Image: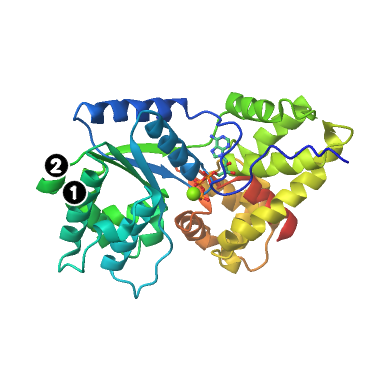
Amino acid sequence: MFKLAPNPFTPQSGLEPKVLGGREEVISEFVRILKNKEKGRGSHLLLLGEWGMGKTTLLKFYKKIAQSKGWYAAYVSLPKISPRERSYDVIQSLTEELCFGLGIEPQELIGTRRKNTTIFLVEFLAALYKRVHNEFILVLIDDLQNVSIMPAVVDILRLALSHEQVLRTTEYLFVLSSTPEGWEGFIKRHDPVGRFFRKKQILGKLNYPQVEMTIKETIKDSGISFKEEIIARVWEYTEGHPYELQLLCSHLYDNNIRKLVGEESWEPALVATLKDLGIEHFSQLYSRASEREREVLNVFAENRKFMTITEIRDILIYDKKLKKFPIANVKNFIYRLADKGLLIRDESKRYRILDNMFAEYILRFR
Ligand SMILES: Nc1ncnc2c1ncn2[C@@H]1O[C@H](COP(=O)(O)OP(=O)(O)OP(=O)(O)O)[C@@H](O)[C@H]1O
Ligand SMILES: [Mg+2]
């Protein structure tokens, strides 16, 4: 018989990590929001975060917290919809999922088709609240960006939650999660939505001590250790992005030599990580850039710091000596790359590449 030491890292969307790095502040704020709700105060919550930042993980943790305090709680992830679907269908499947999440047969609560989707939702929420004997209910709705082609869905949610009958007879706390880009889409078209879901939590990357703690706590008792330089390099490459951190560390763990993750483990682990990220995210991201934009993006991949447009232009002219490059258009290429989410901009109008891992992917595989 062989005893295997299973990899303790969790590089999978929505998979609960062994250790939750950081997030103390948002979690204690959530606990305060629950308490306020119990006292009859407060508003619903919006959780924003880019891909892989830990939205699903946190929603599932919120569910556990609420349940430990005696709340009913249901988690629903919204699937991508097709333009042919109607908002009624989306809301109806949401109510069904909610019932399943609470172990209730949807037929018990969902009647025949009503004329108006908002009223349908209002009556459902009132019936569900009664069905759980007037206990507090936490509803976690994940991946709202998947319905961004149908902004009416969020507006119906707003209308139902601010409906007299729901306000007067029920006690719900809704937490909606989305990518910032997806959420922008909703508030652009429906201003009242932005005002209604005012309470916001924005998930960012972890800082260095949080990365270090996450790695050390995750490998504790595994019999495998990571050299300090390697932990520092994980930080340098991932900058504390939770998904990238889990993925890279998982590959590093698998490449340990005599139970130690050191210099020899780095290269194979990094290549494997970049290949995975390429398939899952980066190739799609890269395909947004045109041929010309890619030449500019390459400069950003090589120089991973904030730079002014003039600095980029100088590199293109003096270092790259690109032939027939329309240098007068560099500014527009940069603006477009930023619009497409491949570059980020700071307050002093300087630009840098979105992500170090993305830069590494471009240099090695493109
Ligand atoms: N605070 C954290 N500390 C350590 N690992 C985390 C943390 N939050 C999330 N993770 C890990 O990061 C990865 C991404 O988390 P999650 O799937 O929750 O993110 P998401 O924002 O929902 O991403 P997606 O864009 O895929 O929906 C998972 O592998 C998870 O285990
Ligand atoms: Mg998710």
Query: Which residue, given by chain and number where applicable, does mark 2 sit on?
Result: 169
Q: Are marks 2 and 1 in contact (CB under 8 Å)?
A: yes
Circle 2 crowding by C-alpha within 10 Å: few under 14, some 14–19, many from 20: some
Quarter of the figure with the C terminus = bottom right
Q: Quadrant of residue 34?
A: top left
Circle 1 crowding by C-alpha within 10 Å: few under 14, some 14–19, many from 20: many
At x 31% / y 57%, what residue is drawn?
95
Dot 2 falls on a residue whose secondary structure is helix
Rendering coords of residue 93 (x, y %): 34, 62
Tell me if residue 151 comes above or below residue 98 in the rendering. Answer: below
Tell me if residue 317 comes above or below residue 1 in the rendering. Answer: below
Horizontal side, residue 65 vs residue 38: left or right:
right
Query: Which residue, given by chain and number where applicable, does mark 1 sit on?
Result: 126
Rendering coords of residue 305 (x, y %): 60, 40
Amino acid at pointer 2? Thr
Answer whether residue 151 is visible to the viewer in this image: no
Tell me if residue 87 comes above or below residue 47 in the rendering. Answer: below
Rendering coords of residue 344 (x, y %): 50, 47
Amino acid at pointer 1? Ala
The residue lying toward the viewer, choosing from 202 and 253, is 253
Dot 1 falls on a residue whose secondary structure is helix
The residue lying toward the viewer, choosing from 264 and 111, is 111
Tell me if residue 283 comes above or below residue 202 in the rendering. Answer: below
Quarter of the figure with the N terminus = top right
Horizontal side, residue 259 vs residue 177: left or right:
right
Q: Which mark is residue 27?
A: none
At x 75% / y 46%, what residue is drawn?
270
Q: Quadrant of residue 224?
A: top right
Mark 2 and mark 1: Cα distance apart in space? 7 Å
Work out which residue is located at the far bottom of the displayed protein and give it: 84
Answer whether residue 148 is visible to the viewer in this image: yes
Among the two numbered marks 2 and 1 on one chain, the one whose residue lies closer to the N terminus:
1
